[in-house]
C-alpha cells in the first residue's frame, strides 16, 4: 500500500496519510486505514485524533511519528513514485506493472489471468 494524497483536491488527505503511516509504526496501519475511510467526509484533526485513541494507539508516539521527517519523506517519495507511473487518482491498482482499468472482481481476475498466461508463455 502506497500513499498518494490528492493534496489539491482533498485538503485532509495528507494528514490522513500521515496518520495511517504513524499508526503503522505501532502495527495498526490497517485499523487506521479502515477508520479513515469510514470517516472520509469528516477527516478533521479532531476526528483523526479520535480514531487514533479508538484503535488504542500510544498518543504521544502517534503524534511524534505523524509529524516526523521520516513520515513526510515517505509520503513525498510515494507521491513521486505515483506520478512517475502516472497514477491519477486513488485507489489505483496495478497488476504486474499495469494499471487495472476494470476494478470489479471480474476485471481483476481477467487481468491477473492474462498476466499469468503471459508468464507461462
Image (spheres, rainbow, N blue to C red):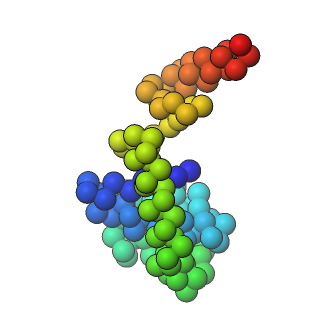
Residue nearest the observer in this picture, 94 or 50: 94
Residue nearest the observer in this picture, 90 or 37: 90
Q: Is residue 82 left or right of residue 108?
A: left
Residue at 74% x, 16% y is 120
Residue at 51% x, 22% y is 107
Q: Residue furthest right?
A: 120
Residue at 46% x, 78% y is 67
Dividing the picture into quarters, in which one does residue 24 lie? bottom right
x, y percent for residue 121 = 71, 13
Q: Residue furthest bottom?
A: 60
Asked if 10 appears above or below 82 in the picture, the reply is below
x, y percent for residue 89 = 36, 43
Residue nearest the observer in this picture, 19 or 53: 19
Q: Residue furthest front?
A: 84
x, y percent for residue 93 = 50, 37
x, y percent for residue 46 = 37, 76
Asked if 83 appears above or below 104 in the picture, the reply is below
Residue 59 in sight here? no
Residue at 47% x, 50% y is 81
Dividing the picture into quarters, in which one does residue 27 lie? bottom right
Asked if 63 appears above or below 75 in the picture, the reply is below
Q: How many marks?
A: 0
Residue 8 in sight here? yes
Amino acid at each position: 500500500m502506497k500513499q498518494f494524497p490528492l493534496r489539491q483536491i482533498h485538503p485532509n488527505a495528507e494528514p490522513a496519510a500521515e496518520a495511517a503511516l504513524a499508526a503503522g509504526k505501532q502495527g495498526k496501519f490497517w485499523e487506521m486505514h479502515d477508520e479513515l475511510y469510514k470517516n472520509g467526509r469528516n477527516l478533521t484533526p479532531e476526528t483523526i485524533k479520535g480514531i487514533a485513541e479508538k484503535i488504542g494507539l500510544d498518543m504521544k508516539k502517534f503524534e511524534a511519528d505523524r509529524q516526523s521527517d521520516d513520515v513526510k519523506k515517505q509520503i513525498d517519495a510515494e507521491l513521486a513514485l505515483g506520478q512517475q507511473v502516472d497514477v491519477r487518482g486513488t485507489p489505483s491498482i496495478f497488476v504486474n506493472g499495469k494499471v487495472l482499468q476494470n476494478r470489479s472482481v471480474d476485471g481483476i481476475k481477467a487481468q491477473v489471468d492474462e498476466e499469468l498466461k503471459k508468464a507461462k508463455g
